[in-house]
Amino acid sequence: MLMELNDWIDKYIKDEHTKEVYGKWAEKIEKDKLIEQEKQNIAQNLLNLNIPIEKIHLATGLTIEEIKKLKK
């Protein structure tokens, strides 16, 4: 996804300052996505250890609903 966004930026944005702003925005989106994936991985590992969902919620910041989806 990040590659597609960067390609779009290069194709349609000509102003270097705007390209830089969009590039940083795209990097933040990708970083946030990776952090969210890591939280889900940790939650899955904790579920596998039979840690209560409420404690996983407190440890990861994921919602109870997100954790329940991982449990299925």
Image (cartoon, helix red, strand yellow):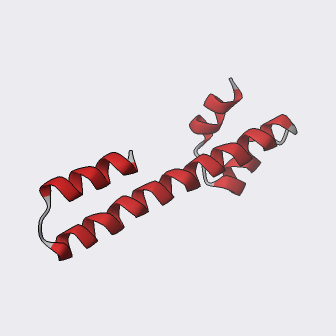
Dividing the image into 4 quarters, which one contains the N terminus? top left
As rendered, which of 59 and 11 lies closer to the eye?
Answer: 11
Seen at 13% across and 55% down, the residue is 12
State the image coordinates of residue 18 (x, y, percent, origin top left): 18, 70
State the image coordinates of residue 33 (x, y, percent, origin top left): 50, 51
Is residue 65 placed above or below 1 in the rendered structure? above
Q: Is residue 3 left or right of residue 34?
A: left
Is residue 35 placed above or below 24 in the rendered structure? above
Is residue 21 placed above or below 36 in the rendered structure? below
Q: How many marks?
A: 0
Q: Is residue 21 left or right of residue 26?
A: left
State the image coordinates of residue 57 (x, y, percent, origin top left): 67, 49
Q: Residue furthest bottom?
A: 17
Seen at 42% across and 63% down, the residue is 28
State the image coordinates of residue 67 (x, y, percent, origin top left): 65, 37
Seen at 80% across and 43% down, the residue is 46
Dividing the image into 4 quarters, which one contains the C terminus? top right
Q: For residue 20, what is the image quadrant? A: bottom left
Is residue 50 placed above or below 17 in the rendered structure? above
Q: For residue 68, what is the image quadrant? A: top right
